[in-house]
Image (cartoon, rainbow, N blue to C red):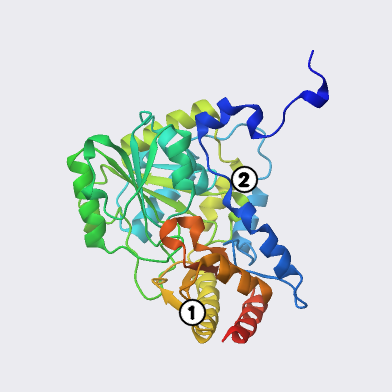
Amino acid sequence: MTEPSEVPDGPSARPGWAARARLPAFPWDRLAPYAEKARAHPGGIVDLSIGTPVDPTPGVVQRALAAAADAPGYPLTIGTPALRQALVEWCGRRLGASLAPVQVVPSIGTKELVSLLPSLLGLAPGAQVLLPELAYPTYDVGARLAGCEPVVTDDPTSHDPSRVGLVWLNSPSNPTGEVLDAARLRAVVEWARRHGILVASDECYLELGWDAEPVSVLHPSVCGSSTDGVLALHSLSKRSNLAGYRAGFAAGDAGAVAAIVEARKHIGLLVPAPVQAALVAALGDDEHVQVQRALYAARRETLLQAVRGAGFRVEHSTAGLYLWCTRDEACWDTVAALASCGVLVAPGEFYGAAGASHVRLALTATDERISQAAERLASLA
């Protein structure tokens, strides 16, 4: 019998588990000492590292959630008829897409879909999942969880289609804020369709265009009169301050949606009924989105002037909730310099090797904290 003191712990205890998933270390843990340094600043930390909404959830959404609080039964995986109709109408109004209810499915936040999509679609182990060179780390993680091979590329059409199972696009980009125009999106869609490959487009920041107008992969200028072979993912976390509700959805190719629904039924991934009601309210009210957009626009202008005044070069960042910045040094040196004045940012390395000399600054802080960040950045000039 093994004595308790002899029982190994940590990842080395069960190497088989780690080998099967082959997941990288969670990157944000590496930021902890810099966060501690920033907190020690006399004025407290200004955390611009993670895009967590800080403004109130709109009242219309809160009221809808409360009114649906009596929910003793299991919710529908596919969503209530009211929610499916709200999704269809929103996609038509905001994306220019003509869809049927069988082409939409709600999700428990959009990260659920990003991390599980290759598995939900049943991609063959070893299939390649193409993702942008600078990208949200969860695209990579989702591929690995399914036993697929993540491949970074900004030109999917240059790859051997016989090896590709899924193509990820992200416009507006996290972390860079780059917007892919209709022509670039269309080129990828047409290539993928010729080879029977699904294109999944993460469009969570689509309603936050600043210097460029983002277009959905579901728009006719990209996919023509059919949404076959394309799937768009959307989140209400940022545009409606619903990160705590975990509310998102996928829309597009009917076959892909059917596969997602079937797998989620087996797994039991159900969006809570009150959240489904809140989604209906949020999707039907455009006014609160414009109010929130105005707040972010003002914060962006303040922060943009400050980082440029501090000697940073801002690249892309034409949409979304981030500024992608560099002063041509190792990203961790920039992180340390900013932490010393109480500002915490994300190192570009988190998003791929191409980000080694960049940092990402989020606009998701209060007006007061954004103003503080601007004052502190002035000390670096």
Give the secondary structure at mark 1: loop
Q: Residue at x 64, y 52 (%)?
A: 29
Q: Which residue extends farthest front?
A: 6
Asked whether 374 or 242 is in front, the reply is: 374
Q: Residue placed farthest to the left in the image?
A: 194
Residue 157 picture location, percent across and down? 22, 49
| Front residue (pair 338, 219) | 338
Q: Tell me residue 50's x, y (percent).
A: 59, 61
Q: Which residue is mark 1?
A: 312
Which mark, residue 274?
2
Residue at disc 2, secondary structure? helix
Image-based side of 291 in relation to 319, left or right:
right
Give coordinates of residue 302: x percent, y percent. Answer: 54, 82
How far apart, in angstroms, are the residues tagged by discs 2 and 1? 44 Å
Is there any visible trace of residue 283 in the rendered image?
no
Quarter where residue 90 is shown = bottom left
Q: Is residue 44 left or right of residue 327?
A: right
Q: What amino acid is at disc 1?
A: Phe
Image height of 211 relative to 91, above or below: below
Q: In the rendered image, is residue 123 in sight? A: yes
How busy is the neighbourhood of tag 1: few (under 14 within 10 Å), some, or many (20 plus)?
Answer: many
The numbered mark, 2 or 1, whose residue comes first in the sequence reads 2
Residue at 44 percent across and 50 percent down: it is 86
Per the rendering, the mark at residue 54 is: none
- Within-10-Å neighbours for mark 2: few <14, some 14–19, many 20+: some
Q: Quadrant of residue 174?
A: bottom left
Decide: is 62 above or below 124: below
Residue at 43% x, 31% y: name it: 147
Image quadrant containing the C terminus: bottom right
